[in-house]
Every structure is written in structure tokens, then in C-alpha cells.
Image (spheres, helix red, strand yellow):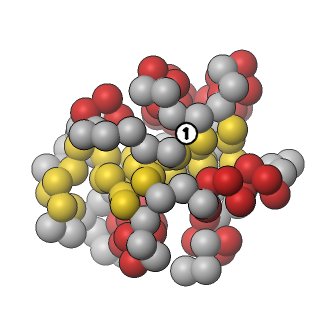
Amino acid sequence: MTDQAAIDGFLAEKKLAVVGVSHDRNKFGNIVYRRLKAHGIEVFAVNPKINVIEGDFCFPNLAALPEPVGGVVIVVPPEETKQVVIDAAASGIKRIWMQPGAESDEAVRFCEEHGIEVIQGLCIMTLSGS
């Protein structure tokens, strides 16, 4: 069970990355990206297959971000999630939100072992007022 302090801390961040953005405005990664931006959060898009999303530059991975972020929203298949959290740890990121469908037990264990707060089982859109 994710605790409320972890949720509050994540939602208080002013700079986030969304890993798994899509050009398709109906796909969840795109929706999350647009809605977080609409709420005044500086959001960096991450997807190695896309160069531009919604008129913004899209980065190939977390290491390529131009500045530090406070957390990462993960919207990728579970088999890709562990690599994302490994990359997050290498970048010094201490907050992860695994969207439903992205959860990976192995990735959660990695987070716990490396002092990374992890939120799972909850949709960020239902809690962020979007």
C-alpha cells in the first residue's frame, strides 16, 4: 500500500518526467504529459522513438534530460519498467510513480532497495485534480 506522504510529496514536485509518452493524444502517456503540464508542472517527455511531442522536445532517456527532475511517471509495459527505475536511480531521482499497467514487482524491489519512493496501484490522474 502506498502511503499518503509519498503521494503528497510526488504531487508537490514542480519538475517531472513522463517515460512512455506517445504521439497519440488518446494514449495514456500523452494524456498524463498534457495534464501535468496544464497544472503548471514542468514536464519532460521521454521516449527513444519520438523526437517531438506536443511541440516539445522528447528525450531518449532520463540521462538525456537537460536538468534534474523530482520524479518520474512511468507509462511503459512492465518488462521495461525495471530499466526505467535503474536509469532513474543513476540520475539521482528518488520518486517513481508506476501507472497501472506499468507495475513490475522486480522494479518495486529495486526501488525499495535503493531508497526510491515508489507509488503503484493508483492512477496519477485520479489524484492530481486532473
- Residue 111: image location, x then y, percent: 66, 28
- Residue 93: image location, x then y, percent: 51, 34
Q: Which residue is mark 1?
A: 78
For this rendering, which residue is in front, 7 or 122? 7
Q: Amino acid at mark 1?
A: Pro
In what quadrant of the picture does the C terminus appear? bottom right
In the image, 130: left or right of 112?
left
Q: Is residue 35 visible?
A: no
In the image, 70: left or right of 97?
left
Query: Residue drawn 45% across and 21% down?
Result: 90
Query: Residue drawn 43% across and 65% down?
Result: 41
Query: Residue drawn 54% across and 56% down?
Result: 13
- Residue 36: image location, x then y, percent: 45, 69
For this rendering, which residue is in front, 50 or 71? 71
Vertical placement of 126 versus 103: above or below?
Answer: below
Circle 1: element type = helix
Query: Residue drawn 60% across and 41% down?
Result: 95
What is the crowding at mark 1: few (fewer than 14 residues within 10 Å), some, or many (at least 20)? some
In the image, 120: left or right of 12?
right
In the image, 44: left or right of 56?
right
